[in-house]
Image: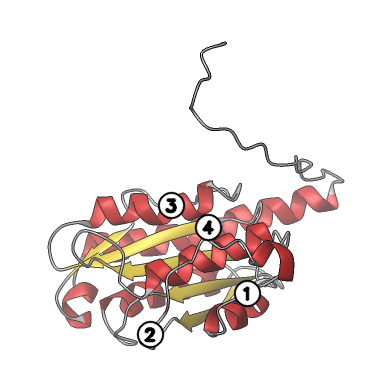
Amino acid sequence: MRERTDMKVLLINGSPNKNGCTAAALAEVAKSLKAEGVESEIYHIGTQPLAPCRACRACGKIGRCIINDKVNEFLEFARNFDGYVIGSPVHYASASGVAVPFLDRAFFADFMSGRNSFRLKPGAAIVSARRAGTTATLDQLNKYFQINEMPVISGRYWNMVHGATPEEAARDAEGMQNMRILGRNMAWHLKCVEAAAKAGITPPEAEVPVFTNFISDGRA
C-alpha cells in the first residue's frame, strides 16, 4: 500500500446498466487507484431522458445549462475532483445514448460559463464492448478532454474490455490489466502535479479563446 493522499478521482459510468461491464472495468480502475493511495467515487449517469444540447449558449450568460436536469447537479458535484475517468459501453460504434448528450452539455456548459472545472485536470476514457466499435468510441470520448486542455492518461493499450456480461469482462485478462495500469498512471500523474505545486511550479496561464472559421472573403 502506497502513502495515502487527499486526491480523489471521479469515475463516470455512462452505461444505462449500473452494474454491467463498464462498471466492472471502472471497479478495477478504482482498486488500482486505492492501492496507490488515491480515493475514487463512481457517478452513474443513469437512464432518465436527457435532452441534447440546444446550442443556445445560454450557459455563458447564466452560468449553468438552461435545461433543468441532472447535468447542472453533476457540474457542481464534479468540480471538486482532481481527475476523471469516463466509461461507456459501445452502442452502434459510439458512446451510449445517455453519455453523449450528458457529456456534450456538461463540458460545454462548464466551458461557456467560465467555470473551467476540468482544465488541466487529467482525464481518461474506458469502453466496454461485446466485440467491436471500441476505438471509435475511445476517440469520441477523448475529445472531451482534449478540447478542455486536460492531459489524457493512457494505459499500455487502448483502454477497453470485452464481454457480454460483467463476468465475461472480468475474464478479459489483458483488458483488466490495462485498467489497473491506467489507475496507476492516473495516480502517478496526480502525485506529479502535487509535487510540482509544492515545488512552486505553477500551471500555464489560460488564454482567452479565439474562434475562427474557414470561410475566405477572397482577400487573403
Can you see residue 85?
no
The x and y percentages for residue 173 are 22, 65
- Horizontal side of residue 179 vs 94, given as left or right: right
Sequence order check, earlier mark of 3 and 4: 4
Front label number (3 vs 2): 2
Q: Residue 206 at x, y = what percent?
A: 76, 43
Name the quadrant containing residue 20. Answer: bottom left
Judge depth for marks 1 and 4 and give the one in front.
1
Instruction: Give 135 or 163, whichever is nearer the viewer.
Output: 135
**Quadrant containing the C terminus in the rendered view:** top right
Which amino acid, by three-letter code, is at mark 2? Pro
Q: Which mark is residue 75?
A: 1
State the CA–CA distance, disc 3 to disc 4: 8 Å
Q: Is disc 4 placed on a helix, strand or loop?
A: strand
Q: Earlier in the sequence, mark 3 or mark 1?
A: 1
Residue 49's disc number: 2
Q: Secondary structure at mark 1?
A: helix
Image quadrant in which the N terminus is located: bottom right
**47 in relation to 209, above or below:** below
Q: Is residue 187 visible?
A: yes
Give the residue at mark 4: 123
Which is in the foreground here, disc 3 or disc 1? 1
The residue where tag 3 is placed is 142
Crowd class of label 3 (few under 14; some 14 to 19; many from 20; radius 10 Å)? some
